[in-house]
Image: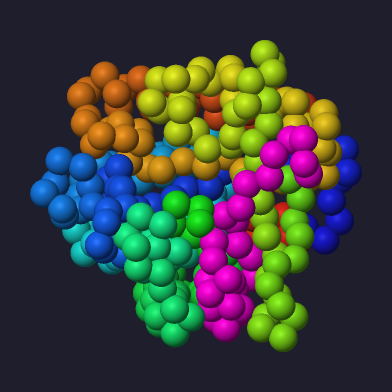
Amino acid sequence: MNKKNQKKLYVTITMDVDPDANIAVEGSITPVSPEMDRRISIRETRWGLYILFRIADILDLPLTVFWEARTLNLVNLTWPELINAYRQKKNCEHGCHGYRHEDYDGKKSGQKLSFEETKALIGKASNIISRTFGCRPAGFRAPYCRLTDNLIKALGTFSFQYDASITVKQDKSPPKPYQIGEESEGQIREIPLYQGRDSKGEPVSGYLWQLFEGNRTPDQYLSLVQGTARKFPGCMLQIAIHPWHLRANKKNQSPARIGKAGVSKLWYFLKKLQKIPNVELVTVSEYLGL
């Protein structure tokens, strides 16, 4: 998108594809799924991917998908038709979300990764995504949205064009791209996540986490979009989803009511989102003109 309409807010639907309800644990750089005896599950992630693909297909929505490479491999092995559908979908961008959802900064694991360790993992993940979709990923979102200096350097090494991990808040700066990293190490652009306010003035971010946990309504997120469109035309707002969240909660519990309620809320939100004046849905790369 070489010339942006400065009267529009650009919105991108992003997906973090990783194991079901995964959490970081002490002593390991890789996560576990709750109720799984220190292992991971991708059952709800697979179904969430299917549901999101169907919704995006019906509503003709552009998607920016950040794949954890291990999960991508597992879904491709067990449901190759689903990955092929994403491969063939028009207006769908494929980015990277780590190799095995690593705790790169060691905040929980206690094992901060060196530059060489980080570079090796990003290289593995990038290669898997490239082989699967036929093009190298341009974008990255850090697991847990915790970006490290070593990650920034590694992303520059593999010619990533942007990162989408850091959150900016309404009272500090608008959600517009800015440069991160040293020029000599391959500077990249940060496409920030955004925390604004709903119609009552309460803080709300573009992650739909609280929607699927039942703590917020679709209308509160629509209010975030409308407010951002008024205040920051020409900028980009990311709406972020974990596919597993359509089928389970953060404890990896998946009673039928969670799935039905989550899909219904998401459908309502996306249908209304498409009708908001001066809002255009795009992929991140389309917004950046890549």
- Residue 149 % position (x, y): 58, 71
- Residue 258 % position (x, y): 29, 23
Work out whether 53 lies above or below 102.
above
Q: Indicate yes or no whether the magenta region holds residue 168.
A: yes
Decide if residue 131 is in sight here: no
71 or 147, nearer to the observer? 147
**What is the quadrant of residue 155 in the picture?**
bottom right
13 or 133, nearer to the observer? 13
Q: How many marks?
A: 0
Question: Looking at this rendering, what residue extends furthest in the left direction?
Answer: 37
Decide if residue 8 is on the left or right side of residue 137: right
Work out whether 219 lies above or below 213.
above
Question: Looking at this rendering, what residue extends furthest in the front direction?
Answer: 110
Q: In the rendered image, which quarter contains the C terminus?
A: bottom right
Question: Looking at this rendering, what residue extends furthest in the top direction?
Answer: 200
What residue sits 46% from the left and 25% below the top? 211
Decide if residue 19 is on the left or right side of residue 163: left
29 or 226, nearer to the observer? 29
193 or 16, nearer to the observer? 193
Work out whether 118 lies above or below 111.
below
Decide if residue 206 is on the left or right side of residue 104: right
What residue sits 35% from the left and 36% below the top? 245
Work out whether 219 lies above or below 238.
above
What residue sits 43% from the left and 66% below the top? 104
Decide if residue 192 is in sight here: yes
What residue sits 62% from the left and 47% below the top? 167
Coloration of the structure image:
rainbow
Q: Indicate yes or no whether the magenta region holds residue 120.
A: no
- Residue 236 % position (x, y): 72, 45
- Residue 282 % position (x, y): 66, 48
Q: Which residues are magenta?
A: 147-173
